[in-house]
Amino acid sequence: MTGPTTRADIVVVGMGVGGEAVAGSLAEAGLDVVGIEAELVGGECPYWGCIPSKMMIRAANLIAEASRIPGMSGTVDVRPDWTPVADRIRHEATDDWNDQVAVDRFTGKGGRFVRGAATVLGPRSVSVEGVGVIEARRGIVLATGTSSVAPPIDGLADTPFWTNREAVSAKDLPASLVVLGGGAIGVEIGQAFARFEVEVTVVEAAERILPAEEPEVSALLADTFRSEGITVLAGRAATQVGYAGGTFAIRLDNGDDVTAEGLLVATGRRPQVAPEMLRALELEPGLRALPVDERMRVADGVWAVGDVTGKGAFTHVATYQADLVVADVLGRPTPEAEYRALPRVTFTDPEVGSVGLSEAQAREQGLAVAVGTANLQHTARGWLHKAGSHGLIKLVMDTDTGLLVGATSAGPVGGEVLGALAVAIHGRVPVEQLRHMIWAYPTFHRGIQDALRDLPIG
């Protein structure tokens, strides 16, 4: 490594959501902070993830809502057009993938910004090609995030397949698309594109789409997809991919072939933990994520935040962890990290929100489990809402403690209804106390009350 050696109080490697939050807060507190980013300050969420994808989904949902007008409030003629969606992503969300505003936001707080790929040399030392070595007096914060994983399918690497980045930045959509992977990214983008008249096929190697969610939710979403003309091939794995003449050909493990103009690979993401990073920090080789304690410490003088910790690939986890790191660096008292009530939402239609343990996870842990469910279409709000009201609420209770340990909310506002369930689990509110709440009427939240009636008393 050539170049001078410089010093700072804190060096933050990776300026995604978590890294930017730590770096900015510590700079505002008066520390000399160097933030290093090889791509864009802000990371995946504002440029290729949460924000632009939800713009796509909002636009697609408007098309679906318009299609529900007949029989309820009149007639409508809807003609989908991707152009305004692509323009909005470029000009409102991403500044055409320019992060100058974010860089200025950080440096305006007193931080020093370095563009480049960093190599961790030790607990308090980092190098950046063309810049030199940066030594940290207090320590370093690792926020290197995750990257898309392309499975080792024969021929795939030689084709122009998309990840979520190419899908989000597309100015034009293909006439047809195969989505490899029926997890959150795959089903969100797949449904959104289908509503813009793309012929979509979702291929999932597991036995059901959204395999991390409750099986009832997987069945609900699969039925919804089929009703919208989306083909769902679950329990099928791709074994070979070819591309010729503008067409992808995907061979499945049952011998069938699926063809399409486009191919989106959404088979997961992997924390960016380089082998040299593990060696420099004297950690066990081959770790998939950085091990952290309750204060987000990896080692003396080393903290980690965000996806690289393996605690959940969500923006809200990264910002939660960032607050813990800032408090620890500044010597402030802070609660220990807790992930028992970690919520997540898949923004399909219906939205799928979940928090805590699934029924299967609770049983695997040896808990005495009781389950309560409610069909949203059978609630007053579902009847009033009519078109597009399909959904369910599922509660998982530990009968030994009388507490909820997990919950799922799927429906038109599944993510919003999840808020009440997350509070119940995080605050350890007894089921009997929830049972005696006064629930607003008529709301989708009231489905929680219906599901509570399924749970045992006492």
Image (spheres, rainbow, N blue to C red):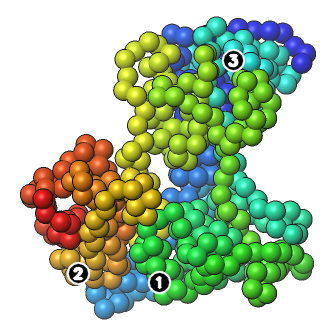
Q: Residue at x 46, y 42 (%)?
A: 316
Front tag of 3 and 2: 3
Q: Residue at x 59, y 29 (%)?
A: 304
Residue 89 or residue 128, whichever sits in front: 128
| Proximity of marks 3 and 2: CB atoms separated by less than 8 Å | no
> Is 340 placed above or below 345 here?
above
Q: Position of residue 367 (x, y in %)?
A: 35, 56
- Residue at the spot of label 2: 378
- Residue at the spot of label 1: 223
Q: Is residue 428 left or right of residue 228?
A: left
Tell me where residue 182 sits by quadrant. bottom right
Q: Position of residue 303 (x, y in %)?
A: 58, 24
Asked if residue 62 shows in the view, the reply is no
Q: Earlier in the sequence, mark 2 or mark 1?
A: 1
| Mark 1 surroundings within 10 Å by alpha-carbon count, few (fewer than 14), some (14 through 19), many (20 or more) | few
Q: Quadrant of the C terminus?
A: bottom left
Residue 324 or residue 79, whichever sits in front: 324
Helix, strand or loop at label 3? It is loop
Q: Quadrant of the N terminus?
A: top right
Q: Residue at x 62, y 46 (%)?
A: 44
The amino acid type of the residue labelled 3 equals Pro
- Residue at the spot of label 3: 123
Please state the total of marks drawn on the protein image.
3
The amino acid type of the residue labelled 2 equals His
Residue 17 or residue 375, whichever sits in front: 375
> Is 182 placed above or below 254 here?
above
Asked if residue 11 shows in the view, the reply is yes
The amino acid type of the residue labelled 1 equals Asp
